[in-house]
Amino acid sequence: MSLHLSIVMPAYNEEECIHEVVETWVDLLTRQFPTENTRLIVINDGSKDRTGAILDSLKPKYPTKLEVVHTPNGGHGNAVVRGYRHAVAMGSEYVFQTDSDDQFVTDDFAKLWAKRHESHFILGYRQIRFDAPARLVITRILKFSLFLIYGTYIKDSNIPFRLINGAYLKKLLEQLPDPTPFAPNIFLAVMARKAGQKTFDIPIVHKERLTGTVSILRWKLIKVCLQSFRELAEFRLELGAKVKALKAVDVKQPVKL
């Protein structure tokens, strides 16, 4: 059965907050879409703590709203793409992606949802970002890299707070490089922007992380940044063909209501 909306949420070692985060987002689905078929799809990315067990314990409580997919650890990017593909395979009309670390508020979802008839691909951006200083520096570097490589300015290209038309996401995934890049959300944002989608860059709240630990720090963060820059630079040669394919996509254009 097709879904009106799927929320894709990767999770890795979030035992301290996963119960509350799942309940908060399921509550949003129940309140905002009482008569629609909707689903929260959580991709447990090989968590080593009790995240998987907690998710399994919640499934009987939300049999029609919560779906848990357990996968070997492949990193955040791979988990996100698995979630996207799962949502698309279920015929989701809209796909929303967020993270499981309790740094976002559900109230901001409405800001993106209100724009769903105006674009196939909508991004939020973190007005005040509560991350480690090193991460903030890397973010600025990547933002500059996008402008340097693609001539494109996107305020928060990797933000895990985005709403995508399901049919359009399917076409985007077909153009995504293989193997999956380290930060696939950046590639999706660049392709959508270059193909003419108005991403909006809607301001949202970003909270300080109070639980868990950040898995990418110091030297690993620098290494990841260099990897992402290399992947983006290599993708530049393919972008023209990818954008051309996306512009040829027969997805019904959103209509303003």
Image: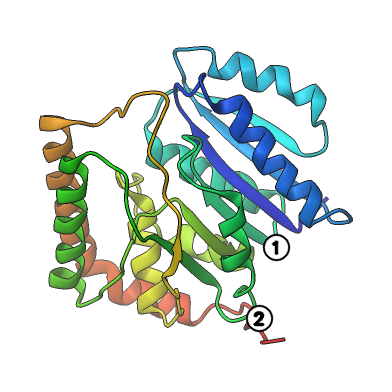
Q: Is residue 132 left or right of residue 178?
A: left
- Dot 1 corresponds to which residue? 93
Res 2 seen here:
no
Under mark 1, the amino acid is Glu
Under mark 2, the amino acid is Lys
Circle 1 residues within 10 Å: few <14, some 14–19, many ≥20: some
Q: Viewer-proximal residue, 33 or 47?
A: 33
Residue, x 81% and y 23% (percent of image)? 60
- Residue 56 vs 185, above or below: the answer is above
Q: Is residue 61 left or right of residue 207?
A: right
Coloring scheme used:
rainbow
Residue, x 17% and y 37% (percent of image)? 221
Residue 73 appears in which quarter of the rendering? top left
The picture places residue 17, in percent across and down from the top left corner, at 53, 26
The picture places residue 45, in percent across and down from the top left corner, at 47, 27
Q: Viewer-proximal residue, 8 or 33?
A: 33
- Dot 2 corresponds to which residue? 252
Q: CA distance from mark 1 to mark 2?
A: 12 Å
In terms of sequence position, does the residue under pointer 1 or pointer 2 come before the other? 1
The picture places residue 27, in percent across and down from the top left corner, at 74, 42
In the picture, the quarter occupied by the C terminus is bottom right
- Residue 53 vs 108, above or below: the answer is above
Circle 2 residues within 10 Å: few <14, some 14–19, many ≥20: few
Residue 91 appears in which quarter of the rendering? bottom right
Query: Disc 2 on helix, strand or loop?
Result: loop
Residue, x 80% and y 56% (percent of image)? 33
Q: Is residue 218 left or right of residue 79?
A: left
